[in-house]
Amino acid sequence: MSFFSKLLGVFSGEGEKKVEKREVREQVRSVSKELRKPKVRDVSGEELMEARHRAKEIVLEAKDEALAVKRKAEEEGRRLRKEAEEVKKKAEVKEEGMERKMGVLEERERQLEAQKKKLEGLMGEAEGLKKEQLGKLEKIALLSREEAKKLILEGMDKYLTEDIAKKIRDAEERAKEESDKKAKEILVDAMKHGATDYVAEYSVSVVKLADEEMKGRIIGKEGRNIRALEACTGVDFDIDETPGEIRLSSFDPVRREIAKRSLEKLMKDGRIQPARIEEVVERTKEEVDKIMLEEGEKLCHEVKVYNLPVELVKLLGRFKYRYSYGQNMIAHTLEETKMGVALGNEVGANVNIIRLGCLLHDIGKAVADEEGDHVQIGVDLLKKNGLPEEVIACVAEHHEDKPFSSIESTVTYIADAISGSRPGARYEDYEEYVERLNSLEEVAKSFKGVKEAYAFSAGRELRVIVDAEQLSDDQAVKLAFDVKKKIEEKVKHVPGNVKITVIREKRIKQTAK
């Protein structure tokens, strides 16, 4: 290999064994010495200069060629790195797609298992209903249809005839003996007896999904998204109940509305992650608070009530999302107030007292951070805000918890009863009602040492009677806590707060002879 070939190999990087730079410099010096040595023949100065210039040109050309090769190698390295990054990104996208598909498959598996359990439950219920119907048929088989119908009509006719005749006689006697005021009270009393009560509860909102894949995104990796939603809103998200939708469960209607609006916004936006969830929920809370204030003002103006304290106006606005036994509270309050004012005008009562009494009669149901009966909560709230005693009496007596103290409170009661008991106003589900009471009692009886358990007040109160020989006072305190926790975990559709009272009584008996 010639000197210039070795020099070119150094700068271009060719060949596995490269010549060291020191060797090249030594060879360059050697060439220079040879050029300086005197020759046999005389060399002119021009030839010597030309040879030196030629040597420099060769060296420069080699350096240029080496730089070109180096640049080419760097460009090739950049290209390879870019291709590697693209391959990495494609691999990440494929991995993400696989995770999504795995989430959808797991979701479908959960749905199939839930449907299987639901089907088994329905088959069991059908068998129970079949046995129940057969039992009823066996009982009435001794009577024909016409005989049973005749027997029922005869009993009702006798009962109604006696009841109506008694009321007519009482009304006539009082009308003869008392003044016009007493006559008005008779009229109000007669209207009062037309009222009835219905019991039901709505506590679920539904959000429709565009496709089943959206459920996987809402759940998130290892369930982090749905846990963030439940933590921020205080609402239970049921994704396994029905395909194509998510059910939101909470007995706080405002929380349910915030959760529903937030979930719809997140699905529309597409960015479902814990940080984004917290941001959207906070913004939705502010939006719902503003809506409730506007709705409260609108309700007050509709019934011609002005200058009410802002705290009460905000609570009235919560009625937009509140349902009492399946009846929307704004619709019920507006309807009741108009009927109460009309009845008050007919009997000559104080219409302004009736107007405020009807408007505020259920205000206690809108107070979310206090436990207890909504009537007493409403009375305490109105006293705190300085409402007239006559209005507070209407609220305190509208469920007959106290004797009626005036015609105005009686009219408030009547208007409330008519609005709630008219056909179609409220939803009635006796099976769910009975199931709720039985569930509460069964939870309490499942603990050791419990003798009896009774659920009443539509499931809002549970009395647990324990054996004093088996449980001490300290154990009874712990039992109350354990019952509370189990109700929260096991019993669905709990009607708001459930008051649990554990009774431990020890009786000692002796007989004297």
Image (spheres, grey):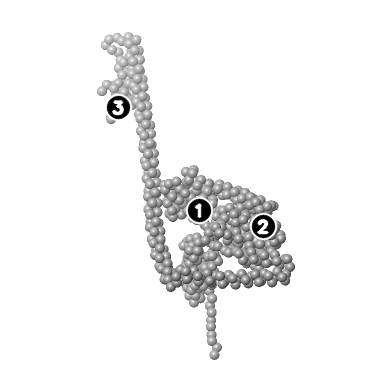
Label 2 packing within 10 angstroms: few (<14), some (14-19), many (20+)? some
Q: Secondary structure at mark 2?
A: helix
Which label's residue is closer to the chain start, 1 or 3? 3
Q: Of the residues shown, which amino acid type is indicated by label 1? A: Ser
- Residue 7, located in which quarter of the rendered image? top left
Residue depicted at 44% across the width and 46% down the height: 210
Q: Of the residues shown, which amino acid type is indicated by label 2? A: Ala
Residue depicted at 41% across the width and 63% down the height: 125
Residue 55 vs residue 468: left or right?
left
Q: Are marks 3 and 2 in contact (CB under 8 Å)?
A: no
Residue 75 vs residue 429: left or right?
left
Tell me the number on the disc at residue 342: 2
- Residue 435 in the image: above or below residue 280: below
Counting from the top left corner in percent of width and height, residue 175 is at: 70, 69
Residue at the spot of label 3:
14
Residue depicted at 53% across the width and 77% down the height: 506
Counting from the top left corner in percent of width and height, residue 204 is at: 50, 55
Out of 62 and 354, give the one closest to the viewer. 354
Counting from the top left corner in percent of width and height, residue 469 is at: 49, 77
Q: CA distance from mark 2 to mark 1?
A: 35 Å
Q: Secondary structure at mark 3?
A: loop
Look at the image and tell me in which quarter the N terminus lies. top left
Look at the image and tell me in which quarter the C terminus lies. bottom right
Which label's residue is closer to the chain start, 3 or 2? 3
Counting from the top left corner in percent of width and height, residue 460 is at: 54, 64
Residue depicted at 53% across the width and 81% down the height: 508
Residue at the spot of label 1:
205
Instruction: Give the farthest residue toward the bottom.
Output: 513
- Residue 4 in the image: above or below residue 462: above
